[in-house]
C-alpha cells in the first residue's frame, strides 16, 4: 500500500473514534441478533470499531473474523485483540475471498463498505458461501438509499430481506 492509502486509513480511523464516542457501535449491533457462540465475519472491518462490542456478544465460545483489504486494518484489529486479551479474533487481508470454510459463519457485518467494493457480486457470492443456512448478512451503507440497498442485495439472488432495524438491514441467506 502506498503512503497516501496509509494516510487516508489513519485519518478515517481517527474520525471513527469521534463517531464511535457519540454513536457507540454496540447500539448498532443490538438489531443484529448476535448470540454467544456465534461465528461472526466483520467484512471491511477498517480499524476494528465493531471488534469489542462483537466480542462481548459472541463471548469466549464465539469467533470473530475481521477482514479488510488494507494491512493497517489487520494491524489495528490485532492491537485491539492483544490489548483486550481476545483470543478468538482472527484477521484476514483480502479484497474478496475469505478463506473460510463453506457454511461456517452465523453473521456477516457488511457496514459502509459495499459502495466501495471493486466487485460487489463476487463479495456477495463469497458471503453467501461462508454463511450457514439461515445465516444473517447485516448491512448498512450510508452512501446508499434504502431502495438501492434492498435491490442490490436481494437482486443477487443470494439473500432476502428479513428485518429492517433502526440502523441496519438484516438479510437472510437463501
Image: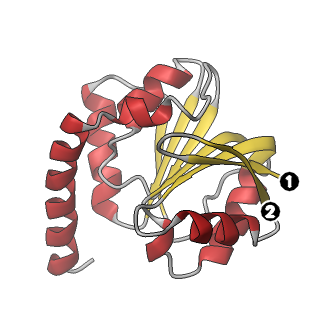
Q: Which residue is mark 2?
A: 158
Please tell me the numbered disc located at residue 40.
none
- Residue 9 location (% of width, % of height): 22, 65
Identify the element where label 1 is drawn.
loop
- Residue 142 location (% of width, % of height): 40, 61
Hey, which quadrant is residue 121 in on the image? bottom right
Nearer-the-camera pick, 77 or 155 = 155
Nearer-N-terminus badge (2/1) = 2
Name the image colouring: secondary structure
Hey, which quadrant is residue 106 in on the image? top right
Q: Are marks 2 and 1 in contact (CB under 8 Å)?
A: yes
Nearer-the-camera pick, 67 or 107 = 107
Residue drawn at x 28%, y 35% is 80
Q: CA distance from mark 2 to mark 1?
A: 6 Å
- Residue 95 location (% of width, % of height): 50, 71
Q: Which residue is mark 1?
A: 174
- Residue 74 location (% of width, % of height): 35, 53
Residue drawn at x 41%, y 52% is 45
Q: In the image, is 36 to the left or to the right of 84? A: right
Residue drawn at x 60%, y 59% is 98
Identify the element where label 2 is drawn.
loop
Q: In the image, is 33 to the left or to the right of 17? A: right
Q: In the image, is 1 to the left or to the right of 169? A: left
Residue drawn at x 33%, y 62% is 71
Q: How many marks?
A: 2
**Residue 173 against residue 146 in the figure, above or below:** above
**Residue 84 against residue 80 in the figure, above or below:** above
Amino acid at each position: 500500500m502506498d503512503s497516501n492509502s496509509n494516510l487516508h486509513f489513519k485519518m478515517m480511523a481517527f474520525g471513527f473514534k469521534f463517531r464511535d464516542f457519540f454513536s457507540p457501535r454496540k447500539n448498532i449491533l443490538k438489531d443484529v441478533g448476535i448470540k454467544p457462540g456465534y461465528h461472526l465475519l466483520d467484512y471491511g472491518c477498517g480499524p476494528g470499531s465493531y471488534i469489542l462490542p462483537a466480542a462481548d456478544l459472541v463471548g469466549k465460545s464465539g469467533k470473530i473474523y475481521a477482514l479488510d483489504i488494507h494491512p493497517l486494518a489487520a494491524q489495528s484489529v490485532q492491537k485491539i485483540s492483544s490489548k483486550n486479551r481476545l483470543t478468538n479474533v482472527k484477521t484476514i487481508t483480502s479484497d474478496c475471498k475469505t478463506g473460510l470454510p463453506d457454511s461456517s459463519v452465523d453473521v456477516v457485518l457488511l457496514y459502509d463498505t459495499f459502495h466501495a467494493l471493486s466487485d460487489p457480486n463476487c463479495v456477495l457470492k463469497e458471503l453467501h458461501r461462508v454463511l450457514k443456512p439461515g445465516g444473517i448478512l447485516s448491512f448498512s451503507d450510508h452512501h446508499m438509499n434504502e431502495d438501492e440497498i434492498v435491490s442490490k442485495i436481494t437482486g443477487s439472488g443470494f439473500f432476502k430481506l428479513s428485518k429492517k432495524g433502526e440502523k441496519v438491514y438484516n438479510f437472510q441467506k437463501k
